[in-house]
Image (tube, coloured by chain):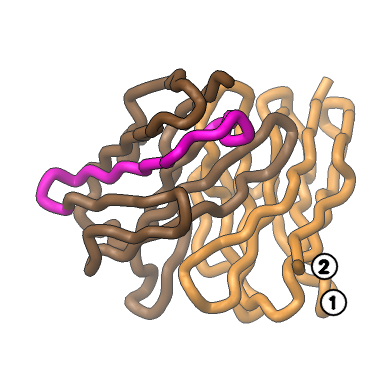
Chain colours: A orange, B brown
Amino acid sequence: EPEVTQTPSHQVTQMGQEVILRCVPISNHLYFYWYRQILGQKVEFLVSFYNNEISEKSEIFDDQFSVERPDGSNFTLKIRSTKLEDSAMYFCASRQGGETQYFGPGTRLLVL
Amino acid sequence: DQQVKQNSPSLSVQEGRISILNCDYTNSMFDYFLWYKKYPAEGPTFLISISSIKDKNEDGRFTVFLNKSAKHLSLHIVPSQPGDSAVYFCAASARAGGTSYGKLTFGQGTILTVHP
């Protein structure tokens, strides 16, 4: 069964460093999302991406964040200058055209 | 942001009995609802969903009920099994831009423990 994959599974970085989180959505899916979950809190929406552009973003998704679909398979989230409060699980999700989003296993980001 | 709320942080049931997980929402624009199951250190796994034009959807042991007037939905698991022990998230979606469903808004989750 096709699934969303994410790399790396864990990332430790120093505050102020740039990180790139990678996702490979399900191959025939058209809509792509990033969510995050800070420890003990809700899963929260960051950004949605369709037709090679951002379709919606949350107030969390400020200028430090960017997304890209560099080729036909990868979908990346870049954090330009990480802060301590960026420490969280980051989930990528995709959907084909129906309503259900399918999630990847997540990347645990720890900013020191 | 409390648009989707799961008021019970945890639920404990005996194997074979019914588990009922509840979810309330406040945003009347939500018209599609999903339940996800999540194990520690894994991503949410889709379980079952319901559109606002229905009041019930069933898939095997899982049934979701929607009460639009009360802005309430519930997930029933019958019979409950120890492997069902996980965190269950309710999520809601509203049509974005009038053409398609957009972001999901999640509840806080309910930890379900099914005892053998």
Secondary element at image label 2: loop
Vertical placement of residue B21 versus A73, above or below: above
Q: Quadrant of residue A28?
A: bottom right
Q: Callout 1, which amino acid?
A: Asp
Mark linked to residue A105 = none
Residue denoted by label 2: A74
Disc 2 to disc 1, how far (Cα)?
6 Å
Secondary element at image label 1: loop
Do the numbered discs 2 and 1 sit on residues whose CB atoms are within 8 Å? yes
Quadrant holding the N terminus of chain B: top left
Q: Chain of mark 1?
A: A
Determine if the magenta segment contains residue B17: no
Image x and y of residue B69, in percent? 10, 50
Mark linked to residue A71 = 1
Determine if the magenta segment contains residue B70: yes
Q: Nearer the viewer, residue A32 or B47?
A: B47
Disc 1 crowd rating (10 Å Cα; few below 14, some 14-19, many 20+) is few
Q: Chain of mark 2?
A: A
Vertical placement of residue A20 versus A110, above or below: below
Image x and y of residue A61, in percent? 58, 48
Q: Nearer the viewer, residue B115 or A23?
A: B115
Vertical placement of residue A48 versus B104, above or below: below
Q: Quadrant of residue B90?
A: top left
Observer able to see residue B89: yes
* Residue B51 left/right relative to A64: left
| Residue for point 53% across, 24% down | B114
Image x and y of residue B92, in percent? 38, 52
